[in-house]
Image (cartoon, helix red, strand yellow):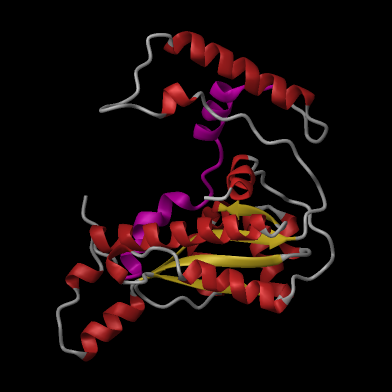
């Protein structure tokens, strides 16, 4: 891996303000090709990529996610877990389809979509573009399904904005490597309490001193706030997956 690529990956930041300059169609086409050429579980190619260009749809998604920048400049994509194509192919050959809609197949689609999105982000950032993921499309999965006319055996997984950056936020500090990387087992460094104290202080300093949207918090308090926040319609995901044809028993 080239040093420039490593440097880009290590300095990743989420961009939420984009210049009102369109990305060249050829660039978008290349990024979409990059997504398609991502490693795929068993070569089943179990995701679909939807570029949303309709202003009214973009505004509806912006309202759903509570992120109004989706309705503004930049390209917006939705990555969809897709077993519909493979189910259709199997049915045409009069084959059983149960293994295309079980937990293994659904997770394989999640892996394919998530890896493709990350490859697209890496390629976009390497070209000087800014990106931000939108897990908030799951605030109302059924509305996304209806809005995008998604067929049975599909599920919208995440959104992605790509554009020309109009801000330069500082990179957020990551967890200490010793808490994340284990050798032959789950990481249990002997100085775990100290590592947590130091990291919470680092995160507190980052949010206290950043120029935009400064606030009083640390990582532990962010985890608690996230766990107690509004889940919107995400509690319905299991039911919606069943409606979409996935058989995911507990």
Residue at position x 54%, y 52% in the image: 135
Residue at position x 50%, y 9% in the image: 194
Residue 233 belongs to the span the image colors magenta: yes
- Tell me the chief SS of the magenta region: helix
Displayed quadrant of residue 64: bottom right
Relative to residue 174, is residue 237 depicted above or below? Answer: below
**How many circles with numbers are drawn on the protein?**
0
Residue 157 in picture, x, y percent from top left: 47, 60
Relative to residue 53, is residue 172 depicted above or below? Answer: above
Classify residue 15 as left or right of residue 177: right
Front residue of this view, candidates 10 and 60: 10
Residue at position x 75%, y 57% in the image: 69
Residue 60 in picture, x, y percent from top left: 67, 66
Classify residue 165 as left or right of residue 85: right
Residue 13 in picture, x, y percent from top left: 67, 43
Does the image show residue 8?
Answer: yes
Query: Magenta region: which residues?
Result: 216-245
Relative to residue 36, is residue 222 depicted above or below? Answer: above
Which residue is farthest front?
2
Does the image show residue 240?
Answer: no
Residue 147 belongs to the span the image colors magenta: no
Relative to residue 82, is residue 193 depicted above or below? Answer: above
Classify residue 68 as left or right of residue 141: right
Displayed quadrant of residue 10: top right
Front residue of this view, candidates 86 and 42: 42
Residue 205 in picture, x, y percent from top left: 71, 19
């Amino acid at each position: 891996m080239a040093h420039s690529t490593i440097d880009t990956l290590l300095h990743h930041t989420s961009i939420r303000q984009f210049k009102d300059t369109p990305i060249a169609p050829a660039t978008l086409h290349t990024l979409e090709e990059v997504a398609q050429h991502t490693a795929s579980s068993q070569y089943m190619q179990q995701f679909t990529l939807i570029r949303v260009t309709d202003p009214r749809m973009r505004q509806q998604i912006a309202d759903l996610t509570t992120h109004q920048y989706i309705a503004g400049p930049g390209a917006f994509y939705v990555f969809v877990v897709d077993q519909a194509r493979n189910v259709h192919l199997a049915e045409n050959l009069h084959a059983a389809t149960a293994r295309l809609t079980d937990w293994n197949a659904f997770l394989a689609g999640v892996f394919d979509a998530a890896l493709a999105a990350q490859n697209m982000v890496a390629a976009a950032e390497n070209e000087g573009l800014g990106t931000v993921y939108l897990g908030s499309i799951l605030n109302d999965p059924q509305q996304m399904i209806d809005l995008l006319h998604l067929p049975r055996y599909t599920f919208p997984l995440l959104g992605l904005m790509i554009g020309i950056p109009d801000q330069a936020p500082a990179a957020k500090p990551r967890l200490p490597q010793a808490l994340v990387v284990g050798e032959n087992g789950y990481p249990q460094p002997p100085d775990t309490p100290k590592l947590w104290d130091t990291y919470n202080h680092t995160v507190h300093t980052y949010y206290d001193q950043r120029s935009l949207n400064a606030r009083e918090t640390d990582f532990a308090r962010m985890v608690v706030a996230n766990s107690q926040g509004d889940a919107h319609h995400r509690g319905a995901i299991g039911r919606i997956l069943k409606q979409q044809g996935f058989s995911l028993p507990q």
